[in-house]
């Protein structure tokens, strides 16, 4: 059977697995692995309502140094307002505008050198957003930037409110990889994240009050209920002990939290040579239960902790704090 050329970087035979080579983090430029982009007269970033002919992307986004993405549109607007205040930028923080207001898929806010974008829930939604975001940064000729995912998660053996900076993003088999099916072939990509950024975030947490932070592995699943071993979904085919045994296995491999986006986030950033980090707060300890019954005001404070940590990191990088 004839091998199929994959973007000029390797071959894969039908029904076999292809492992993509890793791109070093040290290169400040994005490695967009799509030769077809160079032949296109226009690139329409459909879900952002942006395009290379309709918008001057280098002028709009060329100064971006920090990109922060999170699931909720409201949360990312709040983060944009918060970072506006933290960076002491001119103007009213309430006047930040949604660059993607022409579409209802994602929300995007630019605040100085910071881009704040919502990505929705789950791997498919964040994957679509990342394809267009990475192309946007490529077309805008951005260099030397860092990409953060900030969000919430379920803790594994951790107290609620603990912030987890991801060491390795792992799948439901605890493998540090992401599998993408392309034209019926399985493409395996590494989910390694930049160690230096993770350590820097941990150091930043030690300079803050009430932001307990650890570095640990994050397990990414394809859904919220069965895939995460919850007993309270519409479908459940396992016992309480089955669930606890699985969580114990996860904990013993270094997993400290569970969410639904980290593997594809890490894989796409790694494939394009982008320095990135995943910073998520735990809303509950999954050993203690499945439902989130914490009072709303406490949850709001928990959800602000990744924002506070990443904002402190940004201010240090910009020389605004010692």
Image (tube, rainbow, N blue to C red):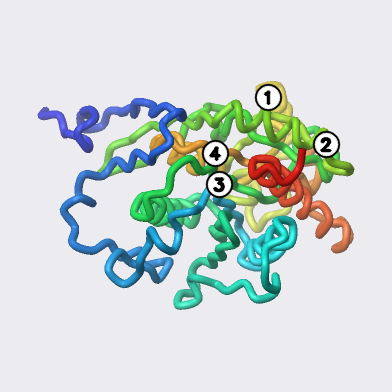
Q: Which residue position holds label 4?
A: 276
CA distance separating discs 1 and 2:
25 Å
Residue at figure coordinates x 60%, y 27% from the top left: 196
Query: Residue 254 bears which disc, if any?
Result: 1
Q: Earlier in the sequence, mark 3 or mark 4?
A: 3
Q: Earlier in the sequence, mark 1 or mark 3?
A: 1
Q: Earlier in the sequence, mark 4 or mark 2?
A: 2
Choose mark 4 or mark 2, whichever is in front: 2
Q: Are marks 2 and 3 in contact (CB under 8 Å)?
A: no
Residue at figure coordinates x 78%, y 49% from the top left: 305
Check the image and report above or below for 111 versus 35.
below
Residue 240 visible at all: no
Q: Which residue position holds label 3?
A: 261
Task: Please state the horizontal and vertical placement of residue 306, each as a whole percent of the image.
Answer: 73, 47
Q: Which residue position holds label 2?
A: 207
Q: Are marks 4 and 2 in contact (CB under 8 Å)?
A: no
Q: Secondary structure at mark 2?
A: loop
Choose mark 2 or mark 3, whichever is in front: 2
CA distance separating discs 3 and 4:
13 Å
Residue 16 visible at all: yes
Q: Earlier in the sequence, mark 1 or mark 2?
A: 2
Q: Secondary structure at mark 1?
A: loop
Left or right of 268? Residue 298 is right
The residue most toward the left is 2
Residue at figure coordinates x 38%, y 58% from the top left: 58
């Amino acid at each position: 059977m004839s091998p199929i050329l994959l973007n000029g970087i390797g071959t894969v035979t039908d029904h076999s697995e292809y492992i993509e080579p890793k791109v070093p983090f040290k290169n400040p430029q994005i490695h967009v692995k799509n030769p077809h982009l160079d032949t296109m007269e226009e690139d329409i970033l459909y879900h952002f309502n942006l395009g290379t002919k309709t918008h001057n992307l280098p002028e709009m986004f060329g100064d971006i140094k920090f990109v922060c993405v999170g699931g909720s549109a409201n949360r990312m607007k709040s983060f944009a307002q918060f970072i506006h205040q933290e960076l002491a930028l001119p103007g009213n923080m309430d006047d930040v505008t949604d660059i993607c207001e022409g579409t209802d898929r994602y929300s995007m806010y630019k605040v100085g050198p910071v881009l704040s974008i919502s990505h929705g829930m789950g791997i498919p939604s964040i994957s679509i957003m990342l394809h267009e975001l990475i192309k946007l940064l490529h077309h805008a000729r951005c260099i030397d930037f860092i990409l953060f995912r900030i969000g919430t998660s379920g803790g594994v053996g951790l107290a609620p409110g603990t912030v987890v900076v991801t060491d390795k993003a792992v799948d439901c088999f605890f493998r540090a990889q992401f599998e993408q099916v392309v034209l019926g072939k399985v493409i395996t990509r590494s989910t390694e994240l930049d160690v230096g950024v993770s350590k820097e975030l941990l150091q930043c947490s030690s300079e803050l009050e009430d932001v307990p932070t650890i570095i640990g592995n994050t397990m990414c699943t394809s859904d919220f209920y069965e895939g995460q071993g919850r007993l309270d979904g519409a479908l459940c085919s396992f016992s309480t002990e089955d669930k606890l045994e699985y969580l114990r296995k996860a904990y013993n491999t270094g997993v400290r939290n569970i969410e639904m986006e980290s593997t594809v986030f890490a894989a796409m950033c790694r494939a394009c040579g982008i320095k990135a980090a995943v910073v998520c707060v735990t809303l509950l300890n999954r050993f203690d239960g499945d439902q989130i019954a914490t009072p709303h005001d406490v949850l709001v404070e928990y959800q602000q902790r990744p924002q506070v940590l990443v904002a402190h990191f940004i201010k240090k990088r910009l020389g605004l704090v010692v």
